[in-house]
Image (tube, coloured by chain):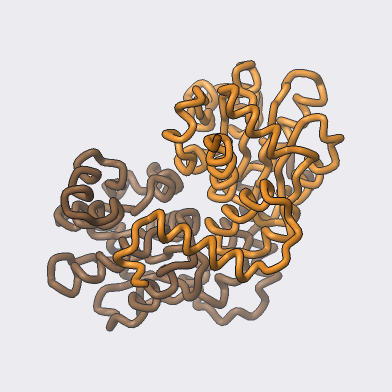
Chain colours: A brown, B orange
Amino acid sequence: MDSLTMRPEAIEAESFRIIDKEAGEHGWPEAEWQVVRRSIHTSADFEYAGSMVFSDGAVAKAVAAIRSGSAIVTDTNMALSGIGKARLAPFGCRVSCHVADPDVAEAARHEGVTRSIAAMRKATANPDNRIFVIGNAPTALFELLRLVGEGKAHPALIIGLPVGFVGAEESKNALAATDGSIPFITNMGRKGGSNVAAAVVNALAIIAARA
Amino acid sequence: MDSLTMRPEAIEAESFRIIDKEAGEHGWPEAEWQVVRRSIHTSADFEYAGSMVFSDGAVAKAVAAIRSGSAIVTDTNMALSGIGKARLAPFGCRVSCHVADPDVAEAARHEGVTRSIAAMRKATANPDNRIFVIGNAPTALFELLRLVGEGKAHPALIIGLPVGFVGAEESKNALAATDGSIPFITNMGRKGGSNVAAAVVNALAIIAARA
């Protein structure tokens, strides 16, 4: 087949066929594999087959949260851009990101914290926000976990995929060490990113849209 | 140091220190290394230290193109989101992406091509667009190379970093096989992505902003 004349849907199907073949015996249940596979698809990195971690029943709970129209909030505009809104619109899921909001910049200055932390505080102050997607900032994930611990945030799902060399791994270890009462999807190690975080949301939305 | 109380600038400096240390003897000249290092920083993936390819003098030419205010066009809104506009504004560099434009969707339907191809045709039709940033769609990069070959596009720089399993590697091989008369920055293999493409632009803009 010539990739230049293939439809996008056919390219995606062929990509998934290649990933399935090369991943071999991965041991993931079907639902989790759809999330892991889309993460590999967006990164071309098979490490995610070994590094992703789901709390018990996270995919089923995430799908239920999407189907009930939970608002989604991200830590970066890149993750916001990568999330397919048309797929989420029928469920009534709004998607937003506060990191570039003028009042967040002002609050960050006033409180002496990063804009990522100030944006997470603003996000949790709105109880409609139930799905938290963190693809970049370890400080955003640490702050969210702190707010959860203090009973000030009640997420239906945390997608925690910060990337980088300072704090990213530690923030995801902290998320994975929670008791699972808040469903989470994360990965171990330094990798991650807004692109992978968006891919996880998109995979969940596709599952949610199925009968 | 506690990453929770570090300033973003300090976290970045510490990240670069770790990357420099772990990369060891990489052999990249200073200017190219700043681009490669920021790609590693955004992906936490040291593979870029071995897989990136620059045409002769690409960084110097890219910096000159930015300093002269060249308009930048991306293939995805994710790459558009990831590019720091405040850093480019002093040079007069506009950044745009046409993939979600209504007239591009219409042209794609009418001409029976993907929206990525139709968006690239629209981008090249505006001679102000001189820097082309492709982080996702192999078809966009193939189309750009076709338009260049036919004398219909005259980029000052092509950043070609499509990711994926169908066509991505081939599109980058095609870019790397050009004669270098159009400066390019690319990588070999399946990896890449809008996040890395944006990181490359940001690295170039930081170099351009230095005295």
Residue B38 placed where, x, y %?
Answer: 57, 53
User: On the picture, is A160 further left or further right than B90?
Assistant: left
The image shows residue A49, relative to residue B127, as above or below, that is below
In percent of the image, x 30 and y 47: which residue is there?
A: A99
Question: Residue at the location (49% across, 31% down)?
Answer: B88
The picture quadrant where one finds residue B148 is: top right
Q: Residue at x 57, y 73 (%)?
A: A49
Q: Position of residue B177 (x, y in %)?
A: 85, 41
Which of these two is toward me, B56 or B13? B13
Report whether A60 appears left or right of A42: left
Location of residue B191 with respect to B3 vertically, above or below: above
Task: Name the quadrant of the C terminus of chain A.
Answer: bottom left
Of residues A160 and A205, the one nearer the viewer is A160
| Number of marks in the rendered image | 0
What residue sits 57% from the left and 44% below the top? B203
The location of residue A171, given as percent across then percent down, is 37, 72
Question: With B181 as the anchor, is A195 left or right in this view?
Answer: left
